[in-house]
Image (spheres, rainbow, N blue to C red):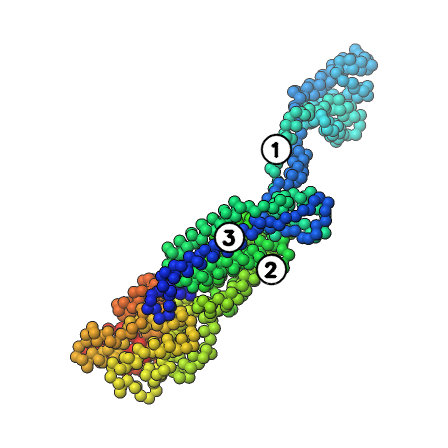
């Protein structure tokens, strides 16, 4: 349990010695005024940016001052949109139509040439000139006499090789895309020639084959202007209108900078040309604030009624929220920070995280999560922050709430700061990459992640110090200071009741070790253990741990002895008030005996009365409150077990185990733990922890008197030993 949760669970009633609550009517009026005031302040903060300043600048004018965006807004960037559309058109591929049967036609032409060549090669009746003339007259394109002569004169094997390779290469090349509006045909003709030279050598046969390829290879696809234009229009239309984001706080124009058309577009988008308050938006923001406020109040009433019953805690909650939002909205300008839009967002995240930590540490972690959730969402919507900022602020605040819950001493602040910085860096990098931020923005965000982590922890530190005392709330900062054994009251305890001081230190160790295992607050229970018996300073010699020669109770009757023993609770609370110990420590002090029976003196009185009665038993019970938390229950059990352990002359593990089990069973059967928050699993864990700790701590102890003779007649040897029973009322 956290300190704030313990504090919130304290019962509020008119007889509570620690709290003087206002009357119901005054409390109701107080809450109404507090709620209205909070709603009004937050609404004003959220609406300030909707009342812009007027400017009269025109294109070409020189700006007399820096002008920054008073809110976040998006506007259409027509120039960028047109540039992107032109780029899309330029990258649109041309469309072509295939020429039907172009590849087959080329292959047929090649085959026709070689068929004619075969005919004339086999006809010996024709002269060379007649063969040339025949070929020229029967082919569909011109071939030089050198090409025809070379192919006619080639031997049979060479001719067959040329024919085969030419047909194969033409088929291969014509299967590719050869467009009519490019130099594809010339490129492939050159490729054909290289392949012929590589195959036939650089001679007349390669030249002849190359000429055939040059005549046959032609485009097989023609440009389709209509389809291309249609595709370009489709690509242009696919480009979405480009909206640019102007972030709140972003610098629109520098002082002495000339106004351009782009500046005018931004002025218009921000409403600076003809400023009129957006009354509809302002009303919507007020309604939004009211809705959020009602939801939060309803949540607190339903799930945290004790916090709602505390006017002081409600005031603190409202102050933290309003101050953080005020700093979020105006902190940058008040500190005269020249922040860009992205820097303003990161600056605002610091205050959200700090508010979450303060609420978690001082009030309640669950309420802190709820508050930062609605603050990031509502402020993002009302102030025009983008989703990236809202998400980043929310995640950073969740981590901040987590790390503040682990602060047990001053040394924990360093790892907490490092953890928060690392988390901020991860959040910045992930959200930046998802959002497509440029590298300069990522670098700026990374720097602010480090600055924000350090600043958030520092603000929490100073904020908690400033708030604790005025509101009477204790954080681990205060507990760390109280754990210092140089505290004046602890020094008095050491000097005036050294046995009690030693006992208190041991109790703190036993209880805090178990607290870690059951989810209780180890620092709180340890500090409370140090102070729980300070009331014994008033009459130290009446408690056996401080006695060295004589037991004073041997000269007193049991009733008087019981009164003295019980009075150390009241004396302790008086000293706690005198030394201004925190309320939560006093709560645990008042509960550490509950309504337990002062058994030792009760049994003495019962023996003398020849039989105990319910009325007699009531006279020997403490009149405090039963433990109402894990911490107070741990203090009660550790107190009894440590005192009882002093009666074990030569303790064994079995003896310690029986003693601890007996004491815990006795407290359970006596109803002392009925109001505590302990489960059966917690009880088992506490028992095992106590046994381990006591076993490691046990050394030679003062041998205490055997009480079994006194108990035998009235209670029997039950093994249910407690502090008073084993220490003559210590």
234 vs 620, left or right, is right
Nearer to the camera, 393 or 96: 393
Total numbered circles: 3
Q: Earlier in the sequence, mark 2 or mark 3?
A: 3
The image shows residue 544 at horizontal and vertical percentages of: 32, 82
Label 2 with label 3: CB-CB less than 8 Å: no
Residue that badge 3 annotates: 43
Residue that badge 1 annotates: 237
Numbered disc in front, either 2 or 3:
3
Residue 209 at least partly seen:
no
Q: Earlier in the sequence, mark 1 or mark 2?
A: 1
Residue appearing at x 38%, y 72% in the figure: 586
Residue appearing at x 64%, y 41% in the figure: 77
* Mark 3 residue element: helix
Residue that badge 2 annotates: 334
Q: CA distance from mark 1 to mark 2?
A: 47 Å
Residue 351 at least partly seen:
yes
The image shows residue 565 at horizontal and vertical percentages of: 30, 79
Numbered disc in front, either 3 or 1:
3
Q: CA distance from mark 3 to mark 1?
A: 42 Å
Indicate the quadrant where residue 235 lies. top right
Q: Residues within 10 Å of mark 1 (few under 14, many from 20)?
A: few
Residue appearing at x 80%, y 13% in the figure: 133
Q: CA distance from mark 2 to mark 3?
A: 20 Å
Residue appearing at x 60%, y 34% in the figure: 238
Q: Quadrant of the N terminus?
A: bottom left
């Amino acid at each position: 349990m956290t300190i704030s949760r313990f504090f919130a669970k304290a019962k509020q009633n008119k007889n509570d010695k620690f709290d003087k609550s206002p009357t119901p009517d005054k409390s109701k009026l107080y809450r109404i005024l507090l709620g209205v005031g909070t709603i009004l302040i937050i609404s004003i903060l959220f609406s300030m940016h909707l009342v812009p300043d007027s400017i009269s600048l025109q294109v070409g004018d020189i700006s007399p001052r820096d002008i920054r965006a008073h809110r976040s807004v998006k506007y259409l960037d027509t120039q960028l949109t047109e540039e992107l559309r032109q780029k899309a058109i330029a990258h649109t591929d041309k469309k072509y139509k295939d020429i039907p049967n172009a590849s087959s036609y080329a292959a047929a032409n090649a085959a026709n040439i070689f068929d004619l060549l075969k005919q004339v090669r086999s006809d010996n009746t024709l002269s060379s000139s007649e063969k040339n003339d025949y070929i020229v007259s029967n082919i569909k394109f011109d071939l030089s006499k050198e090409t025809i002569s070379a192919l006619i004169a080639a031997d049979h094997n060479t001719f067959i090789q040329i024919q085969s390779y030419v047909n194969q290469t033409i088929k291969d090349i014509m299967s590719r895309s050869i467009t009519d509006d490019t130099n594809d045909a010339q490129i492939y003709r050159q490729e054909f020639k290289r392949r012929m030279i590589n195959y036939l050598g650089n001679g007349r046969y390669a030249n002849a084959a190359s000429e055939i390829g040059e005549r046959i290879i032609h485009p097989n696809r023609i440009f389709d202007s209509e389809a291309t234009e249609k595709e370009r229009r489709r690509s242009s239309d696919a480009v979405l209108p480009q909206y640019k984001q102007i972030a709140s706080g972003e610098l629109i124009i520098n002082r002495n900078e000339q106004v351009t058309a782009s500046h005018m577009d931004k002025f218009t988008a921000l409403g600076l040309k003809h400023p009129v308050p957006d009354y509809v938006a302002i009303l919507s923001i007020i309604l939004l604030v009211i809705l959020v406020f009602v939801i939060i109040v309803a949540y607190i009433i339903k799930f945290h009624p004790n916090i709602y019953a505390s006017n002081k805690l409600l005031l603190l909650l409202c102050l933290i929220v309003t101050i953080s939002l005020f700093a979020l909205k105006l902190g940058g300008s008040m500190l005269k920070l020249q922040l860009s839009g992205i820097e303003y967002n990161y600056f605002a995240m610091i205050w959200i995280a700090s508010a979450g930590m303060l609420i978690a540490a001082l009030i309640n972690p669950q309420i802190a999560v709820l508050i930062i959730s609605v603050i990031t969402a509502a402020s993002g919507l009302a102030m025009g922050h983008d989703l990236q900022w809202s998400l980043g602020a929310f995640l950073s605040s969740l981590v901040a709430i987590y790390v503040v819950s682990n602060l047990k001493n001053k040394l924990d602040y360093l790892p907490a700061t490092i953890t928060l910085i690392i988390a901020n860096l991860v959040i910045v990098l992930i959200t930046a990459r998802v959002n497509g931020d440029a590298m300069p923005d990522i670098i700026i965000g990374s720097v602010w992640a480090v600055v924000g982590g350090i600043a958030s922890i520092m603000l929490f530190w100073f904020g908690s110090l400033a708030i604790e005392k005025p509101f009477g709330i204790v954080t681990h900062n205060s507990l760390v200071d109280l754990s210092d054994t140089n505290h004046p009251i602890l020094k008095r305890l050491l000097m005036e009741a050294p046995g009690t001081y030693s006992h208190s230190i041991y109790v703190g160790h036993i209880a805090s070790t178990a607290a870690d295992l059951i989810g209780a607050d180890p620092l709180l229970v340890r500090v409370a253990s140090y102070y729980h018996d300070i009331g014994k300073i008033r009459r130290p010699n009446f408690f056996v741990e401080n006695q060295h020669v004589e037991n004073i109770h041997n000269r007193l009757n049991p009733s008087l002895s019981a009164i003295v023993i019980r009075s150390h609770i009241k004396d302790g609370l008086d000293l706690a008030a005198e030394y201004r110990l925190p309320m939560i420590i006093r709560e645990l002090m008042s509960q550490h005996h509950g309504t337990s029976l002062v058994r030792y003196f009760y049994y003495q009185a019962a023996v003398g009365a020849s039989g105990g009665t319910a009325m007699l038993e009531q006279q020997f019970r403490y009149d405090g409150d039963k433990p109402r938390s894990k911490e107070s229950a741990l203090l009660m059990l550790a107190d009894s077990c440590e005192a009882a352990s002093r009666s074990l002359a030569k303790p064994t593990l079995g003896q310690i185990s029986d003693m601890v089990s007996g004491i815990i069973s006795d407290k359970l059967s006596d109803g002392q733990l009925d109001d505590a928050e302990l489960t059966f699993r917690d009880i088992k864990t506490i028992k095992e922890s106590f046994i381990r700790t006591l076993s490691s701590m046990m050394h030679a102890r003062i041998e205490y008197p055997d009480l079994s003779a006194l108990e035998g007649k009235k209670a029997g040897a039950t093994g249910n030993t407690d502090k008073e029973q084993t220490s003559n009322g210590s």
